[in-house]
């Protein structure tokens, strides 16, 4: 799909069917995650593919909206800050979180291209996620998304105008 169209097509889907996601569709989504750029190409991330079937109750402890567990799959993008690049020369700022965000963006855009719905979830309970997914201490859950067939319609994109977002040359 034309990239400009794809950017408009992706939206936060909050109503899914339980229809299966084909394995080749999932493969394409995961390949898009794999190809995401990361700082110094460290690839300090893992994607956890979670089947929602019979796990609804537990998953709702992570994020308590019904639509989170409506589709057959939920993906969790985790970062591994110890493996990620840091801006050591200056302030040691960690970039594994940024890397994980780019991975999730690749996931959501590839899913949209396949006609599948996603929704970034940042407002999840990290402790519940750690416990239910068995995350080691050094692994940070960054974002979740349901992955499945959409049952809602995209709403109008509400965004600030460019003049409020872009500056030229200086602040
Ligand atoms: C980092 C991040 C965290 C988000 N967390 C949530 C969330 O916890 N729950 C939710 O319903 N939407 C969440 N969203 C979706 C945003 O609300 C949504 O992207 C925004 O309103 C723009 O709408 P659109 O995605 O349909 O274009 C999140 C988006 C981002 C980028």
Image (tube, grey):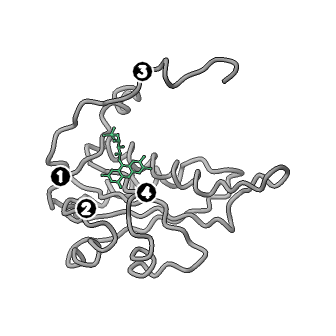
Q: Secondary structure at mark 3?
A: loop
Give the Cα distance between marks 2 and 4.
19 Å
Q: Residue 167 appears in which quarter of the rendering?
A: top right
Circle 2: element type: helix
Quadrant where the C terminus is found in the figure: top right
Structural distance between the alpha carbons of marks 1 and 2: 8 Å
Q: Which numbered disc, 3 or 4, marks the residue closer to the eye?
A: 3
Distance from label 3 to label 1 (Cα)? Answer: 28 Å
Tell me if label 3 and label 1 are in contact, CB under 8 Å.
Answer: no
Quick check: 51 left or right of 83?
Answer: left
The residue under label 4 is 30
Q: CA distance from mark 4 to mark 1?
A: 22 Å
In the rendered image, which residue does mark 2 sit on? Answer: 68
For the residues carrying marks 2 and 3, which lies nearer the camera in this image? 3
- Which mark is first along the chain, 2 or 1? 1
Question: Contact (CB < 8 A) between labels 4 and 1?
Answer: no
Residue 54 horizontal/vertical position (percent): 20, 79
Of mark 3 and mark 1, the one earlier in the sequence is 1
The answer to which of 66 and 80 lies nearer the viewer is 66
Q: Secondary structure at mark 4?
A: helix
Residue 120 percent coordinates (x, y): 37, 52
Sequence-first disc among 3 and 4: 4
Using residue 152 as the reference point, say whether residue 171 is left or right of it. Answer: right
Tell me the tag on residue 15. 1
Quadrant (top left, top right, bottom left, bottom right) of the N terminus: top left
**Picture residue at 55% right of the left edge, 22% below the top:** 166
Q: Check the image and report above or below for 5 versus 42.
A: above
Q: Report crowding for label 3: few under 14, some 14 to 19, many 20 or more residues within 10 A (C-alpha).
A: few
- Residue 36 higher or lower than 20, as above or below: above
């Amino acid at each position: 799909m034309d990239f400009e169209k794809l950017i408009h097509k992706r939206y936060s889907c909050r109503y899914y069917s339980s229809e299966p996601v084909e394995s080749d569709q999932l493969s394409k989504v995961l390949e898009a995650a794999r190809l995401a750029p990361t700082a110094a190409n460290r690839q300090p991330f893992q994607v956890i593919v979670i089947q929602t079937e019979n796990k609804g109750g537990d998953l709702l402890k992570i994020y308590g909206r019904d639509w989170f567990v409506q589709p057959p799959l939920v993906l969790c993008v985790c970062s591994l800050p110890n493996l990620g690049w840091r801006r050591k020369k200056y302030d040691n700022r960690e970039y594994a979180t940024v890397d994980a965000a780019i991975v999730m963006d690749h996931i959501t855009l590839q899913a949209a291209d396949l006609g599948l719905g996603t929704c970034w979830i940042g407002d999840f309970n990290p402790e519940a996620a750690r416990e239910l997914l068995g995350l080691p201490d050094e692994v940070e859950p960054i974002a979740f998304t349901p992955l499945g067939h959409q049952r809602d319609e995209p709403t109008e994109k509400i965004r600030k105008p460019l003049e409020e977002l872009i500056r030229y040359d200086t602040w």
